[in-house]
Amino acid sequence: MNWFPFHLGKPLLDRSAAWLRLNSKTALALIVVAVLAPFLAKPFSLDEPLFLWAGQHLLDQPLNPYGFEVNWFGYTTPMWEATKNPPLCCYYLAGAASLLGWSEVALHAAFLLPALAAILGTFRLAQRFCRQPVFAAAATLLTPVFLVSGTTVMCDVLMLVFWVWAVVFWVEGTQNQRGLFLATAGCLVALAALTKYFGASLIVLLAAYSLTARARPARWIPPLLLPLAVLGAYHLATRNLYGHSLLADAVNYAVPPASLADFAALKSASCLSALAFLGGGLALATFFLPFLWRWRTICGFAVAAFLLAAILLLAGPLLKDYGPVQGSSRTLIGLQLLFWATGGAGILALAVVDLRGRRDAEAWLLALWVLGTFCFAAFINWTVNGRTVLPLAPAVGILLARRLEQTRPEPDRSGVLVRSLVFAAGAALALLVARADFLFAKSVRSSALTTYSKFGHEPHFRFQGHWGFQYYLRAAGAEALDVRHTLLQRGDIIATPENNTNFSPLGADLVVLREVILSSGPRWLATMKGEVGAGFYAASRGPLPFAFGWVPPDRVVVCAVDPLIPPVRSDSSGR
């Protein structure tokens, strides 16, 4: 019995299942457009300005993507120091904008194509790995990590497109002994690496698949030399352009030099947060845990998460490094952390159990895909975030379908109804999280425009903070404060958003308060708010990919340099 996606009564269910089998790609395309189209007007936020500015620069200097300066850390630096991603996504933005313009709606519409391609690629791969490919693709799409990433114009979903299709062509080329498919996969790996550096890990993943599939090395080694050659050329080109290899710089940024003890202390807490990001970011899979494991097994996952949290509490306050997290909210954050970490442990177990039960090349591919990405997110990347969890979403969707096929593959009608309701609940949560991120971006834009309307006419108005706040104030004509080179004068007006990054606190002896501008965003669910423990884009802000709780409004503090004190340089200590 085909139970996806809703229980409609047997006659209608059978007709729907038949239509779905014949029109699977059309159905998936319609779902992608339906869930992402409501967010086309989402304001630009977080790191999106870096991609947008580089794309704008490319229209004038197409061979020098990062050859300009930007104030991103609170002071002016070359763009190649501020960005930590390769430029292929910026080229895509430049091409899309040259046709459609630079508006939010136009560029988000252009990014519907990568989202659609990623889901269709997941469907094609799942056709070889499970009997429910539509379910696997939909379970990839309707997750918080995909929907939130799919409503940005950053590089993550575009990299996922190249990743998934590289795996598709590699698997099909290996199984059917088609050299052209392997060569195509090698080209896609190179494109993935030039979109986001993590894409280069495909070289290891695909090599491992070929070894476990016992493919002839003469067939699969040459295609993997292509992305290595492309990365080498990129290394030399950026060193020639900027006097510094951007590839080496990204590696050093992700893994800063540290002693073994410091590294262990730094990454121990990130392990629990990474489990929560995995379980929450792929919430639909977490909701299906009762169908995948016995309750005593699920309790075992919960005990493991609790023990890890207890160890971290003994080593020091678990939430001590999360800025404004305080008071009674810690209890609610802790409960959410344990719940989603339990889900994350169950998702990792999917890969392990699938490998133990099958022990074939496909099982090895999925297991290494999931476990390798998780280890990168937890222990190698500079911080845990939803964007680093995204690449394993297709593999988890396929593993979820494979596991369900093993546990009661032909559920009765009541079982169909329950599973359909669970799927609907997971999809609804993903949409709510995407909406919360939309409201957050909208709130930031509103605070920036309100600040400019009130103080932009002041002759010495400047602002601190970055992300979307900087993008919209800069577009309006305001100037960012350079804390290293600006000599503050009496009467200067400085606006500082509190929920932001890379700003310097202005001492009470230096300024007087002019106004606090409030801007309401999401009320009970947040993706980037330290007060409730939400840090989708950086776990350094909160240990959860999203969090429930009362979300206070965003605040922009506007101060004036005290006219009674002499000129003084701004404080260069970043926050």
Image (cartoon, grey):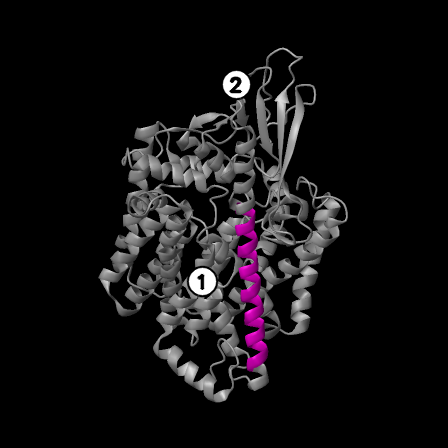
Name which of mark 2 and mark 1 comes first in the sequence.
1
How packed is label 1: few (under 14 Cα within 10 Å), some, or many (20 or more)?
many
Direction top: furthest residue:
566
User: Viewer-proximal residue, 72 or 233?
Assistant: 72
Q: Position of residue 75 (x, y in %)?
A: 50, 25
Report helix, strand or loop for mark 2: loop
Report which residue position mark 2 lands on. 486
User: Viewer-proximal residue, 234 or 72?
Assistant: 72
Q: Position of residue 137 (x, y in %)?
A: 43, 67
Q: Distance of mark 2 from mark 1, alpha carbons?
A: 48 Å
Direction right: furthest residue:
328
Dominant SS type (magenta): helix
The residue sitting at 43% across, 36% down in the picture is 83
Q: Amino acid at mark 2?
A: Thr
Report helix, strand or loop for mark 1: helix
The answer to whether residue 79 is above or below residue 528 is: above
- Which residues fall within the magenta stretch? 416-441
How packed is label 2: few (under 14 Cα within 10 Å), some, or many (20 or more)?
few
